[in-house]
Image: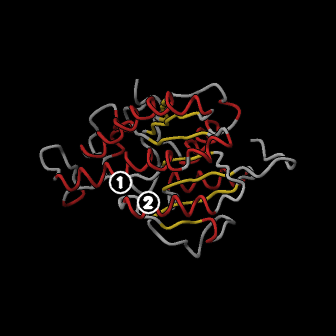
Amino acid sequence: MVANDPQQPRRTLLLTGASRGIGHATVKRFSSAGWRVITCSRHAFPENCPWEAGPEDHIQVDLANSKNMFEAIDEIKRRLPEGQLNALVNNAGISPKADGGKRLGSLETTLDVWQHVFQVNFFAPIMLARGLLDQLKAAKGSVVNVTSIAGSRVHPFAGAAYATSKAALAGLTREMAADFGPHGIRVNAIAPGEIDTAILSPGTDKIVEQIPLHRLGTPDEVAKIIYVLCTETSSYVTGAEIHINGGQHV
């Protein structure tokens, strides 16, 4: 891992969905490399925050609320005095469940749920990237969209709205790579499989038996790939979707 060059301005990451799991690990990975990390989530800044950044680097925003999201974009710009954003990681995502934690299929999912999920999982990533285009362009920055293995196959736990929103986000990543590339901005996606986080569903152990590596992934293993996609190591990689699933997709 290469820390920031002391002769260069400190690099800045904007991360949505930072409060737990993959987002939490991503904050720690970038912070340890000397980056400034601005976090966005529905929740206020936690007093027991495990990293050094304070409330000045946290923005409370409901990505399901378009008006609130655009207000947050204006606030983010105010917090970038150099006018540069080196990386945007769209990690926030929601996956509603039926009663008892059961999977919501396409027959049961209401229109309101479809719209809510797509607003957070699909529309927010492109609106954030477009709203911060000038800042990303100034830094020749990188965008990473967090999709899912559920975006390419029917998953026993992930609902239909979640899965289709992630499939749409994978397609959007390709479109963004083509459109943002001429501005010097790279856009990629990562598609995690079964990662050991607090949101694992009962029965995950049965899936793990079918994974070639025979184990869950860790949030840090995902964060390391996100870091690579935001740094010079991947300077000629754009429009890609990286599978992080221990071979589950094969």
Position of 133 relative to 62 (above/below): above
Closest to the observer, 214 or 14: 14
- Whether residue 121 sits left or right of residue 32 in the image: it is left
Residue 122: give x, y in percent of width and height. 37, 45
Q: Residue at x 56, y 64 (%)?
A: 75
- In space, the residues marked 1 and 2 are separated at their CA atoms by 16 Å
Residue 50: give x, y in percent of width and height. 63, 66
* Crowd band around label 1 with a 10 angstrom C-alpha radius: few (<14), some (14–19), many (20+): some
Q: Residue at x 60, y 58 (%)?
A: 77
- Whether residue 79 sits left or right of residue 95 in the image: it is right
* Secondary structure beneath label 1: loop
Question: Which quarter of the figure has residue 79?
Answer: bottom right
Residue 69, label in figure:
2
Closest to the observer, 246 or 56: 56
* Crowd band around label 2 with a 10 angstrom C-alpha radius: few (<14), some (14–19), many (20+): some
Q: Which residue is mark 1?
A: 94
Q: Residue furthest right?
A: 7
Position of 158 relative to 209 (above/below): below
Closest to the observer, 200 or 147: 147
Question: Which quarter of the figure has residue 27?
Answer: bottom right
* Mark closest to the chain's N terminus, 1 or 2: 2
Position of 62 relative to 166 (above/below): below
Q: Amino acid at mark 1?
A: Ile
